[in-house]
Each structure stands twice: as structure tokens, then as C-alpha cells.
Image: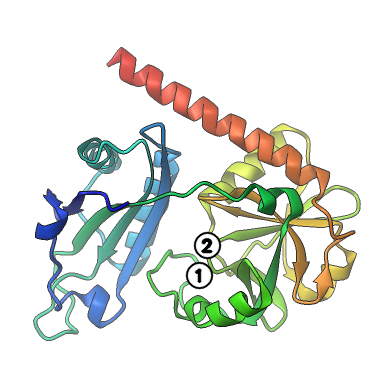
Amino acid sequence: MIYPYLFINGDILQQDRALIPIYDLGLLRGMGIFDFFRVLDGVAIFAEDHIERLQNSMHQMGLDVDYTANDWADKFKDLIKANNADRAGFRVVVTGGFSEDGYSIPDQKNVYMLLHLLPPNDPKQFAEGVSLITSDYRRDIPSVKTTIYVRSMQMQPRMKKEGAFEVLYHWNGEITECSRCNIFFIDREGQLITPDAGMLHGVTRKKIISIAKENNIPVVERKVTLSELPEMAGSFLTATTKGVLPVVKIDNQVIGDGRVHPICVKLQDLFQEKIDQYIAAARLAQMVL
């Protein structure tokens, strides 16, 4: 499904009118950031958190635009309404702008927004868990959600060959993140362990840490190495489209007993409750307005 309307620099346009000049620095130099969230029941899920991360990415990349948090929220709603979108993936992209010489950064940045088809998740992945392959790699600016995904794209043939769901990045053996997810481990005492540096701090990661603390599940953010994998009892990924996704194997290392850890199931349910509560609150606010 192709959604008929896109947002380009303040205007909502039909697909056939939504053109991007080839002098865009996002295309010519890879100078761009983005954010991505789900639209469920017509509601932009955890919009405030995604706007905060979006603004942080823009600031770190020098791509600030003259939109307040409320401006962003309103524009999200406008595009969702224009597309009559009930369930979708929503992508926001900010680039360096149109550069006549292909290098100089102009004052005016480019802002694009578009919606994607959001297929349902595969229940088998959640019931049985997924496997990962590793790659010794670190993104240029780990704390920023840039549009540069070259390494993960290069790894797709190997992922397909080995039946892996994702690529787990490490730097000299220190685990950081996956190409599109954050990672957690569960030790034999039932404690959650997640890397504390060298990665993008995901919105779902943030929610899961909060949920765990609310439910007396210990969480430790620290350095995690590949050498620790044999000692872990469980693992899971956190991502916008997947929520909490169990991991049962990394390269040739089976995690725990190779089955989905009960804490993963508990966190899946608690996270879904948070989403349901968010949607209910958003709908109530709309009724009040």
C-alpha cells in the first residue's frame, strides 16, 4: 500500500507532486537524520518521545529547523489525517538542504514526512525467538539516528543465508546495538543488562527500562562483551515496530537454554499495556478537544 500524501517543507502533497531535487545534501553527502514511529488506531505512538529524540538528532547534526515540539506533533496529526491512516509506519527525515555546489550547507534544511505500510508482526518470532549475526562495526555518530545504514544493507545477503533477523554490532568485542534495535540480556539472577554507550538510545528501550523498574525487575546499564554471552540466561531486542522481541541465538552461541525467557514474555505484555493506555489517553484527549 502506498499512502497518497507526503509532507515536504511545510506542504502536504500528493505522491506525484512530491519531488526532491537531486541537489539535496541527504542524497549527495548522506547528511540526514530521521525518526520512525508507529501509528496505531490513528494515534502516533509515544510521539513526545520520538519528537525529543528527533530534536536531539537534529541538534547534534546541526540540522535544526524552526519547529517546536507542538509544531511537530501537529504536523504528524495533519499527515495522518490526510492519509486517513489507521495503522502505519511514520517516517520523518531532515536533510542538510539544497546545496548548489553539493557541499556547502545552506541555512534552509529540508523536512520530509511519509507513511509506510506496517505489516503485522510474525507471532512465530515472539514465540520461538530470533537469531542474530555479529559485525565488528561502530556508526560514525552512535547517539544520532542518521540515514546511513550501509553496513546493515551490506549484511543483508549473509542475514538471508543464515536466517538471521538482525545484525548485532560490537566494537572490539564490546556489544553496542543492532542496526535497527537495542539489545538487552538477562543474567541468571533475572537481572536485565544492556549496553550503556556507543549506541542510539531507543524510545522502546527507554520504555522497557522504565517498565522494568516499575515492576521491580533490576536493570543495569553497563559495558557488555561478546565473551559474556555463554553466561546469559536470555536476551531480547527492543524496537519501534517489534516492541520486545526474544533472541535465542547469536552467531553460533545459543543464549540460555535456547528458549524464550519468561521475563521477555512478561515485558511484552507490560509494554503492550503501555501502548493500549497511550492510545486510550490520546483518544480521550481528542474527545475533550
Residue 13 percent coordinates (x, y): 12, 51
* Residue picked out by circle 2: 200
Residue 235, can we see it? Answer: yes
Residue at image coords 36%, 35%? 86
Residue at image coords 50%, 83%? 154
Left or right of residue 110, residue 147 in this image: right
Asked whether the beta carbons under mark 1 and mark 2 sit within 8 Å of each other, the answer is yes
- Along the viewing direction, whichever of 181 and 4 lies nearer the viewer: 4
- Along the viewing direction, whichever of 271 and 63 lies nearer the viewer: 271
Residue 65 percent coordinates (x, y): 21, 56
Q: Earlier in the sequence, mark 1 or mark 2?
A: 1
Q: Looking at the picture, which amino acid does disc 1 mark?
A: Pro
* Position above or below: 199 against 284: below
Q: Quadrant of residue 8?
A: bottom left
Residue 64 percent coordinates (x, y): 25, 59
* Residue picked out by circle 1: 142
Q: Secondary structure at mark 2?
A: loop
Left or right of residue 130, residue 13 in this image: left
Q: Looking at the picture, which amino acid does disc 2 mark?
A: Leu
Left or right of residue 12, residue 48 in this image: right
Residue at image coords 27%, 62%? 94
